[in-house]
Image (cartoon, rainbow, N blue to C red):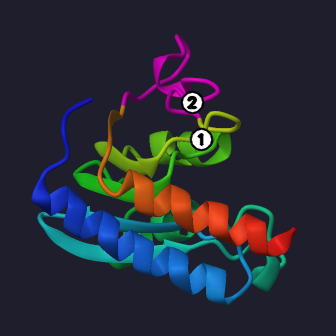
Amino acid sequence: MKLPSSVDRQFIQQALDEANLAAADGEVPVGAVVVRQGKVIATGRNAPIRLNDPSAHAEILALRAAGMALANYRLDDCTLYVTLEPCPMCMAAISHARIARVVFAAPDPRAGACGGAIDLNRAPWHHHSVVVDTGPCEQEAAELLRHFFQEKR
């Protein structure tokens, strides 16, 4: 994992904007942005409640939108920026989409699949390795989640 660049910080900030929109909708505040050749091609934010869809995580919705934007389910030259470490479901989708790189802000020691709770990227049966980087805006993303759950309790 490498140190975040200012470009990484810019795109994570856009993912944080999506996370704030999710929180405003009463959803867990997680946002995602898919970038190709330095341009945002898709965004997503958690919406399982709004969409009545347990798979409507920010990453999944961003991957779906990116596939539509590129008219291809293979996103092999794309980077996914997300505010929270992806869960196993999202990490599997990221792998199947052939995302080249994932950059996440806050780690998730309870459900993260990039080394938090489990590292699916290193599983021997995994068919595609993804470069995973962490760091930009970690405090901001973690605080957004903490505040959301404090308000819910």
Image vertical order of residue 101 relative to residue 72, above or below:
above
Q: How many labels does the image show?
A: 2
Q: Is residue 4 left or right of residue 153?
A: left
Quadrant occupied by the C terminus: bottom right
The answer to if 118 sits in the magenta stretch is yes
In this view, the residue in front, 126 or 29, is 29
Pinpoint residue 38: horizontal percent, then vertical percent.
12, 66
Q: Based on the displayed image, in which of its 4 quarters is residue 33 positioned?
A: bottom left
Which is nearer the N-term, disc 1 or disc 2?
A: 1
- The residue sitting at the top extreme is 124
Q: In this view, does 108 lie to the left or right of 104?
A: right
Tag 1 secondary structure? loop
In this view, the residue in front, 76 or 45, is 45
What amino acid is found at the position of numbered circle 2 in the picture?
A: Gly
Disc 1 and disc 2 in contact, CB within 8 angstroms:
yes
In this view, the residue in front, 74 or 93, is 93
Give the magenta range. Answer: 113-129
What amino acid is found at the position of numbered circle 1 in the picture?
A: Asp
> Mark 2 sits on what residue?
116
Image vertical order of residue 118 relative to residue 81, above or below:
above
Residue occupying the point 35% across, 46% down: 102
Question: Which mark identifies residue 123?
Answer: none
Q: Based on the displayed image, in which of its 4 quarters is residue 60 positioned?
A: bottom right
Residue occupying the point 43% across, 63% down: 140
